[in-house]
Amino acid sequence: MILVTEKAKDRINNLRTEEGKTDAHNIRVSVQGGGCSGLMYNLGFDDKINPADQVFEDKGIKILVDKKSLLYLIGTTLDFSDGLNGKGFQFINPNATRTCGCGESFSV
């Protein structure tokens, strides 16, 4: 399961409106190779649900994850920070053994 904090929920809904997306556009989270720690998070809107996708819903936000990425993301919480030390979405991933300084890449 993937959870969403209130701040992340609010930011997702604001972005959906700003970008002219509809409620049919869900959040797709995936993991791909790259970054300084070996794996990178990918986050975006998607209006298609693939047959092999796992679909999670938290606080009214549907999250789509492909099966391969799910292995790395189980138990992750999606948060949003707009503080002085950084702005953007953050992944609180209990599976990550190491993360880079920017928080965009990790390793397991």
Image (cartoon, rainbow, N blue to C red):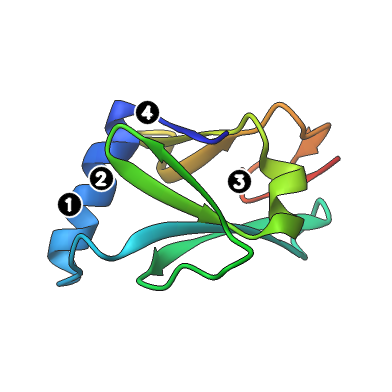
First in sequence: mark 1 or mark 3? 1
Q: Is residue 100 visible?
A: no
Residue 14: mark in rendering = 1
Front in this rendered view, residue 50 or 21: 50
Cα distance between the residues tagged 4 and 2: 10 Å
Q: Can residue 54 be spotted in the picture? A: yes
Cα–Cα gap, marks 4 and 1: 14 Å
- Asked if residue 30 lies left or right of residue 3, the reply is right
Q: Residue at x 22, y 39 (%)?
A: 10
Reading the chain from its start, which is encountered first: label 4 or label 1?
Answer: 4
| Label 1 element class | helix
Q: Residue at x 46, y 67 (%)?
A: 49
First in sequence: mark 4 vs mark 2: 4
Mark sitting earlier along the chain (3/2): 2
The amino acid sitting under disc 2 is Arg
State whether residue 91 is above or below residue 39. Answer: above
Check disc 3 and give the amino acid type: Cys
User: Which tag is nearer the camera, tag 4 or tag 3?
Assistant: 4
Disc 2 on helix, strand or loop?
helix
Distance, label 4 to label 3, CA atoms, is 19 Å
**Residue sitting at the far front:** 51
Which of the pair 51/21 is nearer the observer?
51
Callout 1: 10 Å neighbours few (<14), some, many (20+)?
Answer: few
The x and y percentages for residue 53 are 58, 60
Q: Which residue is mark 4?
A: 5
How far is disc 1 from disc 3 in space, using C-alphas? 23 Å
The label on residue 11 is 2
